Amino acid sequence: MLALFFALLIALPIARRLVDSHALAVFDSFYRAGSLVFGGGHVVLPLHQAEVVPPGWVTRAQFVAGYGAAQAVPGPLFTFAAYIGAVMAPGPNGLAGAALALVAIFLPSFFLIVGALPFWDTLRARAGFQAALRGVNAAVVGLLLAALYEPVWTSAIRGPADVGLALAAFGLLAFWKAPAWLVVIFAACGGGVLASFVMG
């Protein structure tokens, strides 16, 4: 399984250059994102954006809207891949695109878990491996901050009123322990009110 994981990680980008297939390009993009992410679904956000927005598979507005919707539902953020696969402009899209992207992003985890499981007890007992994991976890914090800034902050915060709405939503989550779905509704309604003032 580990050999298959690395073989696909190396072979898919090469095949993508040799074969003009959008389905192969989608599979490669999401397989790499699933292979290279560590520390949670939010870390994959910059990888997704770099792969799907610049080539025009989805617009920036579609990307941010999908990210917001993925935050409002339970389950891993990796399911955001299904949304991207479904709404992307070139085919395959719809149900086929969603399935392709979803399988591609979860497949590396499956290979790694099955492949590394026999060695896990030995690996986690080694000091060098523990130090490497601590280093990776520290790097994840920086990646999470980068994901918060671009595309979330840059697309959502356009003035002082937006900052106030974001702080109110944070307060609802952090201090008043409001459920996430309620905070999403609050932020959506607040954003609608702010947009009507700007339009009016």
Image (spheres, grey):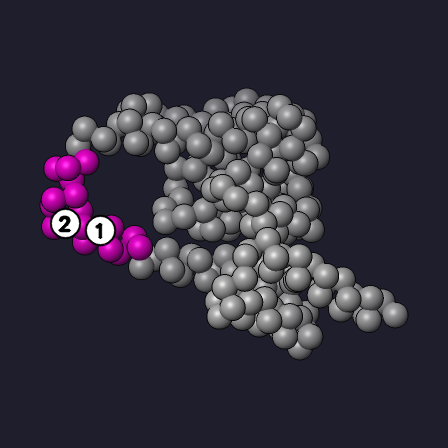
* Residue 122 part of the magenta-drawn span: yes
Question: Could you tell me residue 107's position as x and y percent?
Answer: 42, 28
Query: Marks 1 and 2, how far apart in space?
Result: 6 Å
Local secondary structure at mark 2: helix
Residue carrying label 2: 128
Q: Is residue 135 left or right of residue 149?
A: left
Does any portion of residue 103 appear in the rendered image?
A: yes
Q: Residue furthest bottom?
A: 160
Q: Residue at x 17, y 32 (%)?
A: 119
Question: What's the mark number on residue 117?
Answer: none
Q: Quadrant of the N terminus?
A: top left
Does any portion of residue 25 appear in the rendered image?
A: no
Q: Within the image, what quadrant is residue 163 found in?
A: bottom right
Q: What crowding class fits label 2: few (fewer than 14 Cα within 10 Å), some (14-19), or many (20 or more)?
A: few
Asked if the residues shown at circle 1 and circle 2 are in contact, with their CB atoms under 8 angstroms apart, the answer is yes
Q: Residue at x 76, y 69 (%)?
A: 194
Which span is picked out in magenta? 120-137
Q: Within the image, what quadrant is residue 196 found in?
A: bottom right
Question: Could you tell me residue 108's position as x and y percent?
Answer: 38, 31
Question: Could you tell me residue 168's position as x and y percent?
Answer: 60, 71
Q: Is residue 91 left or right of residue 40?
A: right
Residue carrying label 1: 132
Q: Residue at x 37, y 55 (%)?
A: 140
Kindly identify the amino acid type of the residue bearing the numbered disc 2: Gly
Kindly identify the amino acid type of the residue bearing the numbered disc 1: Ala
- Camera-side residue: 2 or 74? 74
- Camera-side residue: 179 or 79? 179
